[in-house]
Image: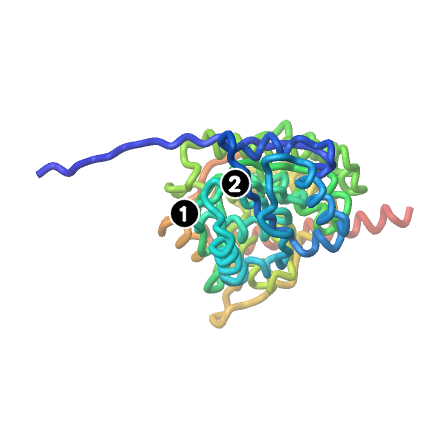
Amino acid sequence: MAPLRCQFQVGYEVPVHFTRGAFARSSTILEQVLTSTPGRVVRVLIYVDDRVLATHPQLEASIATWFADRQGVLLAAPVQAVTGGEAAKADWTIVERIGRTCAELGIDRHSYILMIGGGAVLDAVGFAASLVHRGIRQIRLPTTTLGQADAGLGVKNAINAFGNKNFLGTFTPPWAIINDADFLEALDDRSWRCGIAEAVKVAAIKDVAFLTRLAVLTPALARRDGEAMTEVIRASATLHLGHIAGSGDPFEQGSSRPLDFGHWSAHRLEVQSGHRLLHGEAVAIGVALDTCYAVEIGRLTMAEAEVILGILAGVGFHLDDPELATRDAHGGRAVLTGLEQFREHLGGVLTLAMPAGLGHQEDLTTFENDLFEAALARLQRWNRLFIASSVASARV
């Protein structure tokens, strides 16, 4: 007997707004996003990264004032602070807390959860929002360069578990994304540069013109030029969104994940370092490693690789780290454990995005440890020369 078959498609549209002062009394961006049926009051829960509240002490009052000035929208509860950084994703704490609050307040699927913070907070709160009633509308307001350029744009929500980054999660597109440049001004230097790593990653495999522009902007980015960063974030967001919408695989059912160039080692280095390394810092190292590996297998010339390495090091990333020397119980490099974790995450077939000339990408399905050793040695030599040259220039 032939099986019954059901085939359907679901269309998504995710607006990404670029603004300043999203909660200024005159701002209408959020009003454009909070849609409802006539006669229905829109209820909103807001969760904010505790580090954002610490650096923006006026934020909670601004949010309350913005909602008080509007008809038809209601804060269902006072603004809720949540733990920032990777601690937000360490376990089920935030997920259970949000679920309990939604149950107690009667939050329904026509309500909204607005999350404000770095990528980790967006991941954890978004995961909770995707589970309650099988999905409450989520609005993301990323407050870091990495969140605005990359992490806040995707359709993934996740927490870490069992020694693996993003092991538990869902694919739930946000209702909308609001990139507010005002939040970037309070970032420390490490967090400021993290988004640049993701911009370099996507430019290296998708857009040589953008990569060339990044090289031009490197000095401005290093001195924290706001206009340069705004340009980089918008261009990076455009490329990331273009891939999500146009790849034919937004929920990653296949094995090819071009936007994870350099991430197999980055994810492992983050966990291995106990999250001493920020995600963007680990991505910078991971991209640098795979760039040098691409040289070893003839996908890039060293001159091409130096464009990528020069941008990363030029904006202030350290492209070597003690974790690269750590050995496992069998004497192998601990970072290579990331390959097996990546293979499992991809469904059992190792598929690594790798440059094939600047601005182009071809997947790699084999990985040789001896070539990795050569790539690591190449990167470390280049890094030593870069540091020596920088020190000599500083003395002049």
Q: Which residue is mark 2?
A: 154
Q: Secondary structure at mark 1?
A: helix
Q: Please tell me which of labels 1 and 2 falls first in the chain.
A: 1
Left or right: 157 in relation to 343: right
Q: Position of residue 59 (x, y in %)?
A: 73, 47
Expressed as whole percent of the image width and height from the top left, the position of residue 225 reads 79, 37
Residue that lies at the very extreme toward the left in this rendered image: 1
Q: Which three-letter amino acid code belongs to the residue tagged 2?
A: Gly
Residue lying at 51% horizontally and 44% vertically, measured from the top left: 260
User: From mark 1 to mark 2, how far is it between C-alphas?
Assistant: 18 Å
Label 2: few (<14), some or many (≥20) within 10 Å?
many
80 up-or-down from 1: above or below: below
Amino acid type, mark 1: Arg
Q: Quadrant of the N terminus?
A: top left
Point 58% across, 42% down: residue: 140
Report whether 245 appears left or right of 323.
left
| Res. 134 mark | 1
Position of residue 266 in the picture relative to residue 109 (left or right) = right
Q: Is residue 53 left or right of residue 258?
A: right
> Which sits in the foreground, 26 or 261?
26
